Image: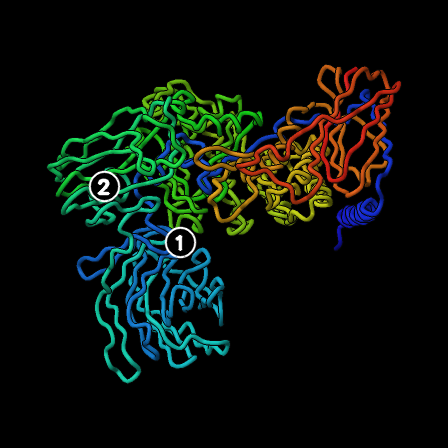
Amino acid sequence: MKNPKKQSSLKVCLAQFISLTLAFSCLAANESRSIELTANPDNVTAQIDEKIYGHFLEHIYHSVNGGLWGELVWNRSFEEVSGEGVGIWSVSDGLIQQESLESNVRLWFGNPEWKDYIFTLQAKKTGGSEGFLVLFRGINDEEFYWYNLGGWGNQRHALEKGNKGERWGTVGPSSNGQIAENHWYDIKVRCEGNHIQVWLDGERVLNYRDTDNPHLRGRVGIGTWSTKAVFRDIKVTSLNGDLLLSGLPEIKEQFQVARHWEPVGEGEFSIAGTDSLNSRVSQYVRSKTGRTGIRQKPFKMRKNDSYAASLWLRGDAPDGLVFSITESNRVLFETELPAPSPEWREYAFNFSPSLSADKAALSIELGGEGSVYIDQVSIMPESSEQTGGYRSDLLGAVADLQPPVIRWPGGCFASPYRWKDGIGPQHERFVTPRKLWDDLDVNSFGTDEFIRMCHKMGAEPIIVVNIGTENWNGEVDQDVFLQDVLDWIEYCNGPVDSEWGSKRAANGHPEPYNVKYWEIDNETWHMGAEAYVEAVRKFASAMREKDPGIVLFACGSGGFNLEWNRRIIEGCADLIDYLSIHHYENPDRFAEGPYNYEEFIKQTAEIIEGSSNPELKIYCSEWNVQSTDWRTGLYAGGVLNAFERCAPVFEIGGPALFLRHVSAGAWDNAFINFDNRSWFPAPNYVVMKLWREYYAPNRIELEGNTDALNTVATASGNGERIIVKCVNPSEGQLDVELTVEGNFVPNSANLELVAPGELEARNTLSRPNRISPEPGIASIQGRTIRFELPPLSAGVLSVKR
């Protein structure tokens, strides 16, 4: 049966969209248009929560390590090996083992000229969330096949093909299936011409002929995706029975030096997987003659700043080591370190460079013949120490947005995150389980660092917990993750004499943090609504029993999935306080996109109104468009206006991305963009900062023709000021005439405009203020204020009584 209320909402949405489209197209053809508005501050229509201007900090593209956290050294514990697809391989006792949880790990071997053959092996999954990659017909790193066993969250098996210049993709039929841990699987691949067959434990799972430019020759290989595994009994034979390969492949030193580091001099370099200081690996260097070691660059160094340096060493190097900071041929600092002992020992010292440099290099070298293991290298500027460990310019950029709440640690990063690995002394912390978004985090920035940062700027923390979903954590006991969540609550909020409260005290904070807001995992759509509701009911009940004062969030929709919201609200609204929804818009829809999402929020609000918890609020915990040109500024203003218009049921917001290093290869939509020297605000930052500065809690009545103008009117708590926030997404000028009714008599008016004049405009590191607010002109005549909004502009009018 059709829902008449839903049909009515959709009709309204469609009519509004048509009206807006006509309005924008008309303005594109005309120089200007007059808009008449009437505001009545005596009629307050809703209360707007300042948490609409919240933010979201995820460990992504070096936003934290390599960014907001003041540590200068990238990959300080050498856990990230060099490049995609490398992994951590070792051979022992007739087994070849892969211990990295990174995605797309491959090891190729054999002859690229092999044509028709049978490839057999045994494989066992030892950890992680997916299965194995069985590689064959590998011509090069772009042209190949692999059979993905237990892919897509350990849900199915399928053949994937890579073609030159393209990303690999699925070809042929797939089948449902999972790969269990600690079970030896027999795998067989047979290639004859374009005919490919695959068997798993004696059962044929693929019978496929590739008729679209098939690969007819190539090597074989083994691989993993977010999984640890061991392999044995590897054999390749021709179709007539000739043995082409038998036994374990040789592991070449393809990852001699960890990622973000480079070798110096002639010597032996490798990633050591045994007896590391902490976590999984350390960097091994052996020198036969002369200075040999490792180097990382670039670093920003300032002559008048002091730096705290630290590194851990063990080994046999009688001539000691040399720690130096250089730029080109200039030596900024150099010191000799004594010969290391066989046991791990920390070498810590302070230094001040003799010169300033933007592209300095750190080198750690053996002074002569010998060998050394290196771990936990750190350089922290005093300017960062003075802020509590944060990079001062980026911390200032965050603080200037005045975030009332900050969500952390993710996002996807939260789903495999193990919070206990990120507390305590830095050299005892463990690396995060998975590399995500070009970032394998070494956990320098954990619970204490995050909450301390929030408190510095008066923001409430929102913590997203990991409930142990199989998609991110593999086959796990969910009760273990529930206990982790309860321990986390106790660490943050428990008394000093509790088990985890005492650990918090030992880490420097005896008083409870009193974290109020907790979200039950992130983007759990892969579970299905029924399974997620069951998890929420299990976790929410236990979490409230642990601390009855906390506020809970459950995962809502991504995009416009109203049915997901309905099922979550119907299944667990009585146990939660907020529904956390996500939405990313096409940047070309900067004009109509905010209105479409506003309608979706209202439809979700209708479901809430008829639920078991009509007081449930909506939190858009991720929103943005994929752009850093002016379109993202227009969208930010429009959607923030929509959020204010949806109050009071809409209460919290938080865009993504927050911070992003400019070296990132994707997600170019961050508010704060930076390198090792400086940063620039994207247009969404510029507009949201302006909107936040003019936040006022009372939405007031606003009437008039707003087809071409995205606007909202608010009033300050004391009634002394009204605010009108406007976005003109059209290519024509808008001449606005605002009449104020009621007891409020205008006395003065101020207009701030952001109007770069073209959609392609953007800020950059070299021009960080290309897009920024400028004063506009507003005139008052009696009760009427007149002002102009240039084409493609966003502005705030402030009127004092």
Residue 323 spot, x, y in % from top left: 24, 33
Residue 168 spot, x, y in % from top left: 47, 64
Q: Which callout, 2 or 1, points at the residue further toward the start of the chain?
A: 1
Quadrant for the N terminus in the image = bottom right
Amino acid type of the residue tagged 2 in the rendering:
Ser
What residue would you read off at disc 1? 103
What residue would you read off at disc 2? 276
Q: Residue at x 61, y 40 (%)?
A: 762
Quadrant for the C terminus in the image = top right
Residue 677 spot, x, y in % from top left: 45, 33
**Looking at this view, is 694 or 50 the one in front?**
694
Q: Is residue 786 visible?
A: yes
Q: Quadrant of residue 339?
A: top left
**Looking at this view, is 188 or 562 the one in front?**
188
Relative to 238, residue 710 above or below = above
Neighbour tally class for label 1: few under 14, some 14-19, many 20 plus, Cα within 10 Å = some
Q: Dot 2: what SS?
A: loop
Q: Quadrant of residue 742?
A: top right
Amino acid type of the residue tagged 1 in the rendering:
Ser
Image coloring type: rainbow
